[in-house]
Image (tube, grey):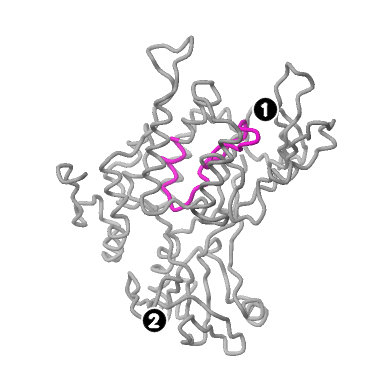
Amino acid sequence: MVIRHSQWHRNCSQRMTRSMTTCKNMQRMYGNPFMLYMFSRTVKSRLFSDIQQIHHLVCFEQQVQDVHLRPRSSNVEPDSWAVTTKALHTGITSVQYYDAIIVSNGHYTTPFIPSIPGLAEFHKQHPHHISHSKHFRRPEDFRNKTVLTVGTGPSGSDIASQIAKYATPPLLYSSRSHDSSSTAPFPDAKAVPAIAAFLPDNRTVRFADESESPPLDAVVFCTGYLYTYPFLRSLSFPTPSSTTTDATPLLPYPEDRLITTGQRVRNVYKHIFYAPHPSLAFLVLPWNIVPFPLAEVQSAVIARVWSGRLSLPSLEDMRAWERQETAKKGDGKEFHRLPGGEDVEYIQMLGRWCSEAEKMDGDEGGEVGKEPFVWGKKEAWVRSKVGEIKKAFFARGDARKDVRTLEELGFVYDDSVQT
């Protein structure tokens, strides 16, 4: 495990209330001493304290340089994965072999900045004016500056609300969904449309409604990230008639490629299993989701499949699922997006899938694996109110750090009126 440069900034808080981000055995981590939306630094410290029980299983300061499939040498032996790592403190590389691989390094490493007319020339003339949310650390760095933020997702709204306290008002809050009637959800900010073009000579931008910004001191893109897996670049899948060694890896079939544009991961079934070889699996590819409970239920599915308690459909059926999703959502970044309650349905679907696991010889007491935390009616209700809750939370200003419960913000769940 290598601890990389993190996109968490000093005042970064969770995107969902603490009760929604819990896992099955982590409720103690989210007790009332903590604010409703916990700071990420608090979550991080708690997580690191919780891994002490498996600390001996983790290899630190090891950079994974390459992962590729090692074909079986006989009809008896299974395929295995060759993993090349480099010890950062010595520079020594080594290769180890595994039956299966879970890729869980996240997808918040390579920033995505959209292509906009004039952007490159603007950056050339004003090299320190454009940045990405990945590099945001302190809102004080924008004191008395005219600032434009681009993107209104959870990170975008969080960062913009912090900068607005220090920037020259109003902070310009840009989104493709904004029009002349839109308003910003926090003080000292103005909602503006999408950027149509950068005007470097004036140090301004022209918006989609033909209006123009004042001269800008900073533009912060909160526009997400690309999926990149450099250690899987040499992934090889031999053709039926080929012979190969670890030293001469083959490129996969074109239709089996994992990454093309970086907008999504290809050939994954249910956003988890690499269909051509399901001993490679991914955690938390979807976005617009709550990571911890999603990762837990995905992990439960992976464990049941790899232990033989659940079966995957045929390769053709897995490809058919991907084609169906592509037809519905497109072949870009929306493929992995789970908006408007789709993450609730996804978590519940995976929970039902887990419940279908078959008991095997040696299983005691009917246990078929660790039971994940699966969202129910209350969690679905909270998820449907997330926008309203977050707006009410930010409206408290600095006093929001004292908010501990939804009820304090006026949100009371009533099971008798929920369908």
Which numbered tag is attached to residue 7? Answer: none
Q: In the picture shown, does residue 218 fall above or below 375?
A: below
Question: Is residue 155 placed above or below 178 in the rendered structure?
Answer: above
Along the horizontal axis of the image, is 255 left or right of 170? right
Amino acid type of the residue that numbered disc 1 sits on in the rendered structure: Tyr
**The N terminus - image quarter:** top right
Disc 1 to disc 2, C-alpha distance: 56 Å
Q: Is residue 81 above or below residue 324?
A: above
> In the image, what residue occupies the spot 67% across and 53% down?
260
Q: Position of residue 406 (x, y in %)?
A: 23, 51
Residue designated by label 2: 169
Task: Pick out the residue farthest to the left.
Answer: 416
Residue 415 magenta-highlighted: no
Q: From which residue to which does the magenta span run?
A: 271-297
State the SS at label 1.
strand
Residue 283, percent from left and from top: 53, 40
Q: Is residue 77 left or right of residue 57?
A: right
Q: Residues within 10 Å of mark 2 (few under 14, many from 20)?
A: some
Instruction: Please name whichever residue, 100 or 27, is drawn nearer the observer in this view of the structure.
Output: 100
Residue 135 left/right relative to 96: left
Circle 1 sits on which residue? 98
Q: Earlier in the sequence, mark 1 or mark 2?
A: 1
Q: Position of residue 49 (x, y in %)?
A: 45, 37
Q: Is residue 332 or residue 318 the one in the foreground? A: 318
